[in-house]
Image (spheres, helix red, strand yellow):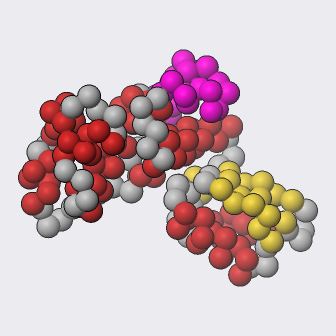
Amino acid sequence: MKHTLIVKNMVCNRCKSIIEQHLNNEGFQVESIELGKVVVQGKEKNDLIKLEEILKNQGFELIKELSEVLIEKIKITMIEMLENNNSENVLSELPIELGKNYSVLSRIFSKSEGMTLEKYLINLKIEKVKENIQLKQLNFSEIAYSLNYNNSSHLAKQFKSITGISMSQYRKLQDWNRKELDKIV
C-alpha cells in the first residue's frame, strides 16, 4: 500500500535524511523523498498511524488539512528559491510554481501564519544574512548583492529593524541567535 505524506518542518536535506533513515529502520520502503513530501510503501492499513508516530518522535508533523499543505508548500518553495540564489523574483514566481493566484496564496498564508508573504521573505533573508555573516565568506555588500538588495544600506536598515542590532554588532556577537528556517513563523 502506497502512502504519500506531506510533512511539516521538513525543510532541509538533513531533515530528509533523518526521516528516510527512521522510516527504513521501521520497515517502510521509501519510494521518494523531497522537501515536505515523502512517498512510502507500507504493509498494511494501520501504517499511517505508525508513520505519524515516527514523524512526531523526530519533531515533524504529518499535515492533513489542505490549507496546511499549501502553507507548507509556500514555505518550502520560498526557502528553496532563496537557497538557490533566486530571491529576486520569489514573490512573482511563487504563483507560477504553485499554480495558484498570488492573492489566494497571500490571503491563506497571512491568515494562517499571522504575517504577509513579503514579511516572511524578509525574515528568511535576514536569517540568510546571519548565516553569511557567521560563515565570514562575504562582506556586507556581497551579502546584499547575493540576496538581490539594491544596496547594502537598504539591507542594513532592514536587518536592524528585524533584529534590533546592526550587522556589525551581530558579527561581533558570540551567541549568533539564529532561527531555523522552519521556525520563522
In depth, the one of 145 and 77 nearer the eye is 145
Residue 143 vs 24, above or below: the answer is above
Could you tell me if residue 179 is visible in this image? yes
Name the residue located 62 percent from the left edge and 27 percent from the top edge.
96
Left or right: 83 with respect to 58? left
Residue found at x 62% / y 37%? 70
Q: Residue 119, relative to residue 33: is it above or below?
A: above
Q: Quadrant of the N terminus?
A: bottom right
Query: Residue at position x 24%, y 53% from top?
Result: 138
Of the pair 57 and 95, the residue shown nearer to us: 95
Indicate the position of residue 30 as horizontal and vertical percent values: 77, 68
Give the answer, above or below, for where 142 lies relative to 46: above
Question: Can see residue 75?
Answer: no
Give the residues drawn in magenta, as a range: 91-112
Q: Which quadrant, please, contains the C terminus?
A: top left
Q: Is residue 74 above or below residue 168?
A: above
- In the picture as drawn, the residue positioned furthest to the bottom comes out as 25
Residue at (55, 28) in percent of width and height:
93
